[in-house]
Structure formats: structure tokens, C-alpha cells
Image (tube, helix red, strand yellow):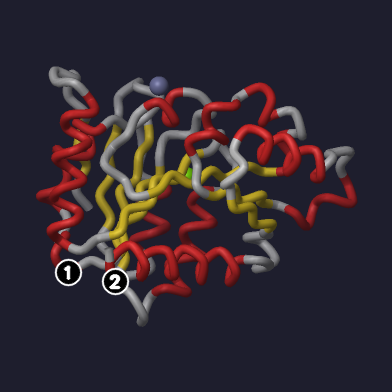
Amino acid sequence: MKIRVAKKILEANDRIALLNRERFKKAGVFVVNIMSAPGAGKTSLLEKTISRINGKLRAGVIEGDIVGTEDAERLEKLGIPVVQINTQGACHLDANMISEVLDDLPLNDLDMLFIENVGNLVCPAEFNVGEDIKVMLLSITEGDDKPSKYPLMFKESSALILNKIDLAPYLDVNIERIKRDSLKINPELKIFEVSCKKEEGIDDWVSWVIDLRDKGMKR
Ligand code: MG
Ligand code: ZN
């Protein structure tokens, strides 16, 4: 596994994001930027997602963490290319960090690239990295006030995945409120209810994202 340390951001983010985007397009890779708070289950979702995609499509992962390689090690077990970015303090990934690791991935051999952003509900939504879509993962244990408190994440995402839905009977969380408030911010948002632990709802999300990729590649 290669570990890259993020360098100082010298260039404007969006210009680099556009260059990344061109590289992804040329390589025929559909790129999904996954954002959530720490502990919502991004790595678990990727494990479940990639194990379903494997054999149909070739997936790769860019793993973003402030320090450490634990999540990347979990995903490498799926037999896919994984690159770790350690941001050394930065609480989000930016286009420049992504650009610096692209040579470490066999882009031309990939169909889908998942970017696991740093766990944070604020700034990951502010930085385009050249992705096709942003996807937000929210654990229902985080409460039903998150759409109203962190609207940008919901606004920028194409899909909202509500994880740990199996815990609903033990929580006071109002799932209908999460959905209603999210759709108020972003009427286009596609919402999935999943339990990575119980393997519930994963297939719906996976076929949706594969479908979106197929449509995007024909464009
Ligand atoms: Mg993780
Ligand atoms: Zn940040």
C-alpha cells in the first residue's frame, strides 16, 4: 500500500478538479465521493458495496484519513487497488490531494473509483475533487437534526444513505423528519435506508450507482 502525505494547496481547487475530471473521463472511470461524519460507516458501506460490484465492474478506492491506514487495510482485503491519503491535519480531501495520487492507481483498468473522504460534515462538501457524484452517508444514531444543521452536505449530494437503520427501534430519531428536511434542501436527492451490519438495503443502492455509471458512460 502506498501512503501519500498531502502537500500544501498551491493552486485553486476547482481548476485542479477539472483536470482530475478530464483524466477520469478519458480513463472511463465513474467517480463517487463519499462523505459522512466519523463513524457513520463509510468503510463498512464500501466493503459491502465493492464485494457486490467485484466480478461485474473493477473498483478502486482512494482512502482519506488525517492519519493512519486502518480503513485502507480493510478495503485492500477485497483484492482491489487502494491508495491511502493522510492529510496530516486537514479535515477534508481537496482536488490537489486527489491529483497527486492518481498515478498510483491503474485508472485505465478501473470502472469505478470510490473516494472515502475524511469524516466531517462540513468542508468535504465544499471541495470538488473531479467526482461524478457526491454521496452522503448519515448514521441514524447521529440524530434527525443534521439536515437543518449541515445543509450543504445534503445540497451537494446526489444520494443520501441512512445507515444503521436496524437500530431505529432503540432510538428516538425521527427518520421521516430526516427525509423530509433533506428533500426540502435537495428535492433531487435519492434516499436509501440501509444496515451495513445486517446487509439490508445495500443491493438497492448498489444497483442505483451501477445504473448511474452505465448512463454516465454512454453520455
Ligand atoms: Mg472509514
Ligand atoms: Zn476541512
Q: Quadrant of the C terminus?
A: bottom left
Image location (x, y in percent) of residue 28: 20, 63
Q: Is residue 70 visible?
A: no
Q: Please, what is the three-letter code of the amino acid marked with disc 1? A: Asp
Determine whether the beta carbon of the residue marked 1 sits less than 8 angstroms from the nearest atom of ligand 1. no
Q: Are marks 2 and 1 in contact (CB under 8 Å)?
A: yes
Q: Estimate the spatial distance between the alpha carbons at disc 2 and disc 1, rounded to whole Å.
A: 7 Å
Instruction: Give the farthest residue toward the left.
Output: 103
| In this rendering, position of residue 85 left or right of residue 91 | left
Count numbered badges in the picture: 2
| In this rendering, position of residue 196 left or right of residue 119 | right
* Secondary structure category for the residue under label 1: helix
Among numbered discs 2 and 1, the one appearing first in the sequence: 2
Classify the position of ligand 2 by quadrant: top left, top right, bottom left or bottom right: top left
Residue matched to label 2: 58
Q: Is residue 49 above or below residue 142?
A: below
Residue matched to label 1: 109
Image location (x, y in percent) of residue 49: 48, 65
Q: Nearer the viewer, residue 193 or 81?
A: 193
Q: Is residue 152 visible?
A: yes
Q: Picture quarter containing residue 143?
A: top right
Residue 185 numbered tag: none
The residue at 78%/57% (across/down) is 166
Image location (x, y in percent) of residue 209: 46, 63
Image location (x, y in percent) of residue 100: 14, 38
Q: Please, what is the three-letter code of the amino acid marked with disc 2? A: Arg
Q: Picture quarter containing residue 51?
A: bottom left
Count residues near mark 1 (Cα–Cα under 10 Å), then give few for <14, some for 14-19, many for 20+.
some
Q: Is residue 141 above or below residue 133?
A: above
The residue at 53%/32% (across/down) is 153
